[in-house]
Image (cartoon, rainbow, N blue to C red):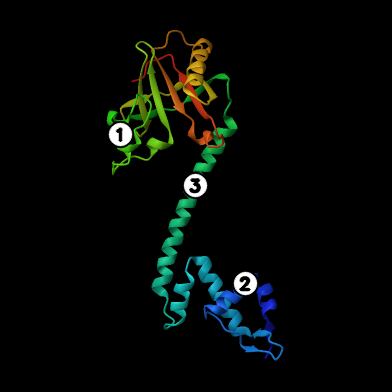
Amino acid sequence: MTYVTSGEVCKLLNITKYTLRHYIEQDLVRPAKVAQNGYQLFDEKEIYTLYQILFLKKAGFSLKDISESFSKEPDMTLSYQGMLDQVEKQLQELSEVKQRLEHMLSIQNNLQLHQTTTQDRPIRYLKQIPDHLLKTETELDFKQIVQQKDLDLSLFEERYYVINLQDDSTISYYVSNEQDYDVRLDAGSYAVKSFLAEDEEKVIEEIEAFLHEAPFDQPSYMILYENVPVSVTYQDSMVYTVEQRAENRT
């Protein structure tokens, strides 16, 4: 029978000697024999056991679970099914993360900071943030929010502010859908400007500059929103986008 040393086992399975020693201490695997010089030697059976341990760990089992399964009859069908369900859930979550990263990358690649441009926008549906969840027209009251059991998390992802330029009032919204909305922003051509701002004074300054640059005369309202997907790459500033359309919203 051919034996291999602990060092050769580690090289074969791409693990450290510390990891192998830990598995031995946990009584998950034992050397086939110990040579006179003290070297621990392993044969095919132990190598296969180590492979099983590594596979089960990668699948999400804890060492405790693995130890318990090794001490029982070899029937792990239910455990495998549960782990398969968990892997499917993780794959779904990773798919959603991938889609969001692709969305963020697309925005980042197309974003033109501090330039007023004309862009086509699709229909957008907005839901008004309830007054009791706001401290001011634009500031969230997080103490109230944490008490809400059924809160749409999109509220934290992207907030829109529709500013009435006639009376200077502002209403806060979050992104919703066609089945549940308070305001619909029509599709069409919009004057758009994105900018970095570290405080409210800078936001006001940029809005005033935008109103002078925008091509539409005497608009009744203006849209401002926090560009969250891009803002995460900046430490001390938020990327805002301001938009203006000639026609009134419906």
Q: Residue at x 39, y 38 (%)?
A: 154
Numbered mark located on residue 97 in the image = 3
Contact, CB < 8 Å: mark 2 with mark 1?
no
Q: Position of residue 93 (x, y in %)?
A: 46, 51
Residue occupied by mark 1: 180
Point out the frontmost of discs 2 and 3: 2
* Tag 2: amino acid: Tyr
Q: Does residue 124 lie above or below 84 as drawn?
A: above
CA separation, marks 2 and 3?
A: 34 Å
Contact, CB < 8 Å: mark 3 with mark 1?
no
Q: Secondary structure at mark 3?
A: helix
Q: Earlier in the sequence, mark 3 or mark 1?
A: 3
Q: Earlier in the sequence, mark 2 or mark 1?
A: 2
Specify few, some or many for label 1: CA neighbours under 10 Å numbering under 14, 14-19, or 20 or more: few
Q: Residue furthest right?
A: 37
CA separation, marks 2 and 1?
A: 57 Å
Q: Position of residue 50 (x, y in %)?
A: 57, 77
Contact, CB < 8 Å: mark 2 with mark 3?
no
Q: Does residue 16 lie above or below 163 as drawn?
A: below
Q: Does residue 155 lie above or below 85 as drawn?
A: above
Specify few, some or many for label 3: CA neighbours under 10 Å numbering under 14, 14-19, or 20 or more: few
* Tag 3: amino acid: Val
Task: Place residue 185 in its image quadrant.
Answer: top left
Q: Residue at x 56, y 71 (%)?
A: 54
Specify few, some or many for label 2: CA neighbours under 10 Å numbering under 14, 14-19, or 20 or more: few
Q: Nearer the viewer, residue 205 or 222?
A: 205
Q: Does residue 108 lie above or below 48 as drawn?
A: above
Q: Residue furthest top?
A: 217
Q: Secondary structure at mark 1?
A: loop
Q: Nearer the viewer, residue 26 or 155?
A: 26
* Tag 1: amino acid: Asp
